[in-house]
Amino acid sequence: MTYLLITGLLLSACKKQNDESGTATGKEEFALAASQSDATAEEIFDDVFNNVMGVSPEVGIGGTGVFGRMNVSSGRMDGVDSTTCYTLAAKQLNSATRFPLQITIDFGSGCTARDGRVRKGKISVIYTGNLFISGNSATTTFENYYLDNIRVDGTHKLTNVGSPDKISYTIQVINAKLSQSAGNYIQWNSEKTITQVEGGATPLIALDDAYNITGQAGGSVQLNGKYFQWSTAIATPLMKRFSCRWISKGTLSLKKGNDQVAVLDYGSGTCDNTVVFTVNGSIHEITLH
């Protein structure tokens, strides 16, 4: 486990967990809380990735995330959105050069995008250069930013680590906190590598792109007065497509300490909003938003 994840876990290690994972019921309670929380964090920061890449062809691919036209019923993207409810502001941080370039996406007091989700507040991204060029990165922070009813804090960093024959990025989520109602919250750190496996021949067209995701994460959740802490490792690569709102394939191993508690399964490639997890031989389903 990397230093980033170890640090994140140590910050909450002194807080006593409330599960009774030695019992079948306690194990299922832990697995449900941890699985739902990890899937929620994965979904929210996948949305951040899509928006960072989607701002424009100058900095990324353009036309993904809120910048694409999403079919709400299917979760599929079918073009570039021509109507917006957000504003963009660009600021050169060095007057002599175009980069580093800060882009602020301002959703105001409430902005319902074509994907049906309500965003408010600001996302600020600093690009060191176009994300198709190896070595360039984009660092994202949040200012009173909400996705639906979840407040998002922390840092998201995307770095191109690819080569001429392979498009690949590292994604770091650092000290994220996802705050919800009634004092509930998720804390999450993640380190992933995302590698393009389809669509490389058409670099400026996102609809045919597919990526494999590998790596690990660690988190904790305060949920209805109970506290749970977990880690995950991707067992079979997750698959994301810009044409689909959700991760559609792959499995995660969910652990409490060194003990595997459950396996999360994102499916076999169909674009849908369900994740299933198996614990104590029983299969449970999570519905993503």
Image (cartoon, rainbow, N blue to C red):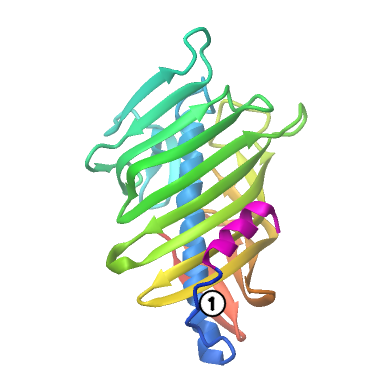
Q: Residue furthest top?
A: 96
Relative side of 236 to 178, left or right: right
User: Where does residue 32 sit, x and y in percent of width and height?
Assistant: 49, 76
Q: Is residue 194 above or below residue 279?
A: above
Relative side of 135 to 10, left or right: right
Residue 124 in sight from this viewpoint: yes
Say which residue appears at 62% left-offset and 85% top-offset: 281
Q: Is residue 90 above or below residue 156?
A: above
**Residue indicated by mark 1:** 31
User: Where does residue 99 sit, x and y in percent of width and height?
Assistant: 53, 17
Q: How many marks?
A: 1
The image quadrant that residue 109 belongs to is top left
Residue 242 in sight from this viewpoint: no
Characterize the local packing of mark 1: few (<14), some (14-19) or many (20 or more) Cα atoms within 10 angstroms. many
Would you say the magenta stretch is mainly helix, strand or loop? helix
Q: Which residues are magenta?
A: 1-12
Residue 6 painted magenta = yes
Foreground of the two, 52 or 18: 18
Q: Is residue 79 above or below residue 32?
A: above
Q: Quadrant of the C terminus?
A: bottom left
Foreground of the two, 170 or 82: 170
Foreground of the two, 83 or 107: 107
User: Where does residue 48 sit, x and y in percent of width and height?
Assistant: 46, 43
Q: Is residue 100 above or below residue 49?
A: above
Q: Quadrant of the N terminus?
A: bottom right
Q: Residue furthest bottom?
A: 23
Say which residue appears at 72% left-offset and 33% top-offset: 162
SS category of the residue bearing label 1: helix
Task: Tell me which amino acid carries mark 1.
Answer: Ala
User: Where does residue 191 sit, x and y in percent of width and height?
Assistant: 63, 50
Residue 266 painted magenta = no
The image quadrant that residue 223 belongs to is bottom left
